[in-house]
Amino acid sequence: MEDAEPGAGAGDAQAAENAAFVMALRGRGLRDTALLRAFERVPRARFARPEHRELARRDIALPLPCGAAMTAPATVAAMLALLRLAPGQSVLEIGTGSGYVTALMADLGAVVTSLERYATLVGQARARLGSAGPRVLHADGLAPVEGRYDRILVHGSVPALKPHWLAALEPGGRLVTGLLDAAGGCRLAAYLRDTDGCDAGPTARLAALVPGRALAT
């Protein structure tokens, strides 16, 4: 019998874990094949802190520096499903965090510009995404933005949509964010530029957006 190649067992185990991760997302209602393949191709563990990588395939939020967090995969899947990305579309992402969702959207063929208020997270996300990856800028995501985009994804909750976000959408554009209700709960919503209406999504746990730029913590 031939000897197994070094690392073959680990590779098989990782493939099985990836498959289980994707099946769990299917079990939560994600049916978009392109999205499922992106989740399979982009390892969440690569964007998690070393001490949390073993938890990366679980459907939980994971802590990041500066008090930030990686959003739970099921919530990420719901946001991306509402966004309805197509290859070649321009995306403004507000709240880079670890860069994981940035990488997912790039894998789906989007041209992503991502804004992050914490300089620490900007540096880490750039290192993970590489020099040829999406643009990650140190910026205040609540401030007026330059340019026009096919899609805007906001990683956070707000009491109301910002008018300058809506003005930055191209015709046919969509914006996805978490909207706060009167009771303090949060529900995902997709704003449709052409109809000036919103598609309601599931409830979600998203932190409130904070204005300004921060150098570290």
Image: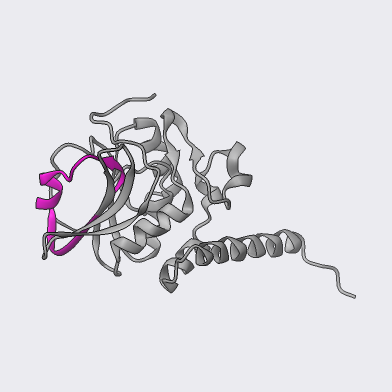
Could you say where residue 35 lies in the image, as x and y percent from the top left? 42, 66
Q: Is residue 166 left or right of residue 139?
A: left
Residue lying furthest bottom: 1
> Residue 157 magenta-drawn?
yes
Q: Residue drawn at (11%, 60%), measured in percent from left and top? A: 196
Image side of residue 212 versus residue 62, left or right: left
- Asked if residue 200 can be seen in this view, the reply is yes
- Residue at 30% across, 66% down: 84
Let me know if residue 153 appears in the view.
no
Q: Does the magenta stretch include residue 98?
A: no
The location of residue 171, given as percent across then percent down, is 11, 64
Q: Find residue 7 and report its image quarter.
A: bottom right
Q: Where residue 142 sits: x, y (%)?
A: 20, 37
In the image, residue 211 above or below residue 6: above
Magenta span of residues: 152-175
Q: Pick the residue in front: 200 or 144.
A: 200
Q: Residue furthest front?
A: 183
Residue 210 is situated, as x and y percent measured from the top left of the image, at 27, 31
Q: Which of the pair 50/2 is nearer the observer?
A: 50
Q: Quadrant of the C terminus?
A: top left
Task: State the scheme by which the image is colored.
Answer: one colour
Q: Quadrant of the N terminus?
A: bottom right
- Tell me: 2 left or right of 119: right
> Where is 152 relative to 156, above or below?
below
| Residue 162 appears left or right of 154 | left
Given residues 58 and 120, the one toward you in this image is 58
